Image (cartoon, coloured by chain):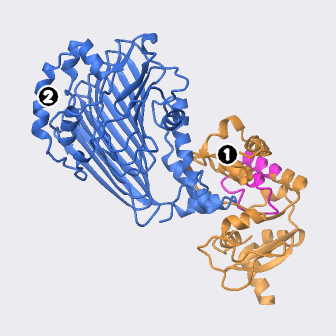
Amino acid sequence: MDDAWRERFRMRALQAVTKRAPYGNDIDLSEFIQAGSIPATITEEVKRKSLEVGVDVSQVKSGTYFQLDHAVLLSQLASKIKGLELMPTDLALSKYEWLREYYWKALSVEQDKYTAMAELKQTKGYFIRSAPNEKIERPVQACLYIDTEGVLQAPHNIIIAEDGSELNIITGCTVGNKSKRAAHLGISEFYVKRNATIIFTMIHSWGDETYIRPRTGAIVEEGGTFISNYVLIKPVRDIQSYPTAYLTGRNAKAKFNSIIYASKDSIIDLGNRLILMEEGTSGESVFKVVATGTAKVYNRGQMIGQSKNTKGHLECRGLMLCPTASITAIPELIAEHSDTELSHEAAIGKLQEEQLHYLMSRGIQPDQAIGILVKGFLDPGLPGLPENLQAEIRNRLSLLDKSGGGGREPC
Amino acid sequence: MGHNASGKTILALTLAGFPQYTVTRGKIIFNGEDLTCKTIDERARAGMALAFQSPPAIRGIRLGNVISLAGGVNPWTPKPGDDPDLPQKMLEKVNLEPSLYINRELNVGFSGGERKRSELAQIFAMKPKLMILDEPDSGVDIDSLRVVGNSLRDYIINYGCTVIIITHHRHILQYLKPTRVHVMSNGRIVVTGSYDELMPKIEAMGYEQLIKEATAHG
């Protein structure tokens, strides 16, 4: 593969390898140097774990991409689905010269040390594209799996929905049992063309010792719709992410939904930035979080109205289950045009006793009642998601009260 | 019975074990068991069921699942022998079309009449030995009242259970004939009598006069 064109990105990346991100703890990436394992097949254990993040690799019915550490084990079926392309990004870049135009366009390679390292240590990633006017009905599934301790996984994903097309993607990210300390820098660039739609659902299930720094940018053109659903239920060492959607075409729309169950001593710093650049664009970010244990959660949000008849709303709803946890909501509204309408709403509190007592009066034990209320609070009802995916996310939530402890851990 | 703020609802909530009310004197003995120090859910499982005057609406929780849970069935992990059709059967008893209500969020957007019926469906699933119904007839139109009244009567005939009903109206009593009537005032039961004896007096004199007379005699 002729990689000369990438040299300029590498040069820019090298300049930024020590550049700290404005948010989150600074992570020393030099610890993560292990070469990943290269298994020949997908084991039962791996199958089970990926099913937990909504990716079914035992019976592949839709376009499926599976990456374990740095190895792509599965990238298939796409050829059988009309209008869909799915392949590892490096392969796509060597196949299509035009794709270089999209590489590091929705995101800057020198944004911080994580984008820089992702470029320098890049490990595959997927390229997904829907052809003009094609509606890809079955969600494309992708799984990014970390298997080896000490590994740095840095996939670069590029997703393009061409004019008038529809793409529904579910990505599950998870770790194997044997990997403890590991880092994941996932780069994702979304391009929603005119009147196209991308619904992207990401389910994260990391481990107590994983450090996560995804970097995401989306460019939404005229009449396009970008919906991003994010689900994080298991503990994580430290995650920080602040995806940005640029609504560059008239009447473009973007919506971010996040469902977070923050437990143990997780550090979770997540935000969404929506830039309403063109007339008639609108955006929304809804962040629902339950905090327990000694988890620390930050929800940032930035809504920037730059053009006439634009509308944006940020919402954060937090439920505190433990006095030792914390939730910080930091919404920012920035109006740069007189005809923009921006709002935010943040409410953080404890479980409503009235509701708890009501359920208990039906003979439900307090722990179970709390589990039910927490589940109900987080219940997705995510717009644009097919029912089976909703059910999948509900299943993930239902794991919360399997322990019989109602999803509550001792404070 | 009794005028507003005479302590009827507080009595019901105290019996059901709501922690905002403390029992300072006396005990709550139910079927020979001392429940005074038991929690709300323990009392419910002992056979005491309370239908709320204004139950809360809870998003993200389906009515059908709460009916199952009230019947001791975990809808997510049912055990062998659990009745999967329990919600259906209970909703039918209160004339709520199961296909329309089973997946509705608990009381969310329910009318007054729907809330009362949702309460009864949940309580019937509990198979209680004692029902405490806090104004099951308030804010309910005549059709809902008929449903509530009939389903209560059927339940009591079929399963036999004690009912304490708090009400301001006589209409519901066309369906349920009480054995005793108690009138509360200032947090106490001040007048007690049979339905046939006391009801006409209440109607004729009103609470104020009745209580005055009773306390003067007492």
Q: Is residue A71 left or right of residue A81?
A: left
Q: Amino acid at mark 1?
A: Thr
The colour of chain B is orange
Does any portion of residue A211 appear in the rendered image?
Answer: yes
Nearest-to-viewer mark from 1 and 2: 2
Q: Nearer the viewer, residue A368 or A214?
A: A214
| Rendered position, A285 above or below A351 | above
Report x, y in % for residue A51. Answer: 52, 34
Residue visible at 16% across and 40% down in the picture: A336
Q: Nearer the viewer, residue B52 or B41?
A: B41
Quarter occupied by the N terminus of chain A: top left
Q: Residues within 10 Å of mark 1 (few under 14, many from 20)?
A: few
- For disc 1, the marked residue is B77
Question: Which chain is tinted blue?
Answer: A
Q: Is residue B64 left or right of residue A320?
A: right
Report x, y in % for residue A83. Answer: 40, 11
Residue visible at 61% across and 62% down in the picture: A366
Report x, y in % for residue A126. Answer: 34, 25
| Rendered position, B197 above or below B131 | below
Q: Amino acid at mark 2?
A: Phe
Q: CA distance from mark 1 to mark 2?
A: 52 Å
Q: Residues within 10 Å of mark 2 (few under 14, many from 20)?
A: some
- For disc 2, the marked residue is A9
Q: Is residue A150 left or right of residue B111?
A: left
Q: Nearer the viewer, residue A124 or A103?
A: A124
* SS of the residue under disc 1: loop
Residue A293, quarter of the rendered image: bottom left
Is residue A232 part of the magenta span, yes or no?
no
Q: Which residues are magenta?
A: B123-151
